[in-house]
Amino acid sequence: MRRLRGGPVSAFATFLAWLLVMLLAGPNPGEPVPISAMVTEGIALQLLLAPLFLILVTRVIDFGDLGLRAPALRHLRLLWLPLLYVAAIFAFAVALGLPTGRQVLFVLANCVLVGISEELMFRGVLFAGFRRRFSPWPAVVAVTLLFGSVHILNAFITGSLTGAVMQAAAAGLSGLLFIALRVRTGSLILCIALHALWNFAAFMATLAQGDIDPGQVADLPLVAQLMPALFVLPLFLYALYLLRDLTRRLGPGPATPGTTSA
């Protein structure tokens, strides 16, 4: 079957449909729960359905190069800083005490699904679709802003808008690193693996220290509220360094047929 040619409009429409799948299959908005509770008690339905939806869509619509290839071994050196973060976060979790083995397995499975879903949606479909119309920097900025802002919807799960906004800011800053790695390596697989590993370490640390009541986030001092964003700021600066020659790597204009997005 010949696939339809996808561009920025169809990519954004896919994004809206993906959001709808996540919201409709997620927990009841009227019953706020900590996000960690969603990933320790089984496989979250929305996290399972969302990547399946994207796989189906990409079988029907050709968005261009999604980067579904293994990275070259030389590209692994680019991970030195994010892997230092992951190691530090996981060491913190181990020091406080890890949860039960059953919970660890559920968290790992859900984090892998999140990595597949979010990377395929943002650094895959959206980035490839936007590149067919826009030059590199507008495409990078648009995808990064969408990735950050979508985390505000976690307010429907936790019941805390302030906490969701702080998470969105941190996600936007760290999200630039994922797209920088996508550009530098040409591999979405590497981004998926790092995203899953990052989330896994973060959830282990959250479970080890216990959830903060979402309703109390707004009562924290401003510095405490900004800590997630300040924590990942070095990753954002590292991403800017990796993207310093973005236009040379991808060309000054939209991607043309026959070229890759990386």
Image (cartoon, rainbow, N blue to C red):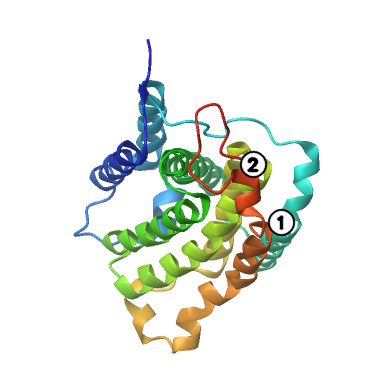
* Nearer the observer, 211 or 181: 181
Q: Nearer the viewer, residue 16 or 212?
A: 16
Which residue has dot 2 on it?
A: 190
Residue at image point 67% right, 55% down: 245
Which of the two labelled residues, at mark 2 and mark 1, occupies the earlier sequence position? 1
SS for dot 2: helix
Q: Which amino acid, by three-letter code, is at mark 2?
A: Leu
Element type at mark 1: helix
Task: Please tell me whether mark 2 or mark 1 is closer to you in this view.
Answer: 2
Dot 1 alpha-carbon crowd within 10 angstroms: few under 14, some 14 to 19, many 20 or more: some
Residue 100 shows up from this direction: no
Dividing the image into 4 quarters, which one contains the C terminus?
Answer: top right
> From the viewer's perspective, is 203 left or right of 241?
left
State the image coordinates of residue 70 (x, y, percent, origin top left).
67, 32
Say the numbered circle drawn on residue 124: none
Give the residue at mark 1: 83
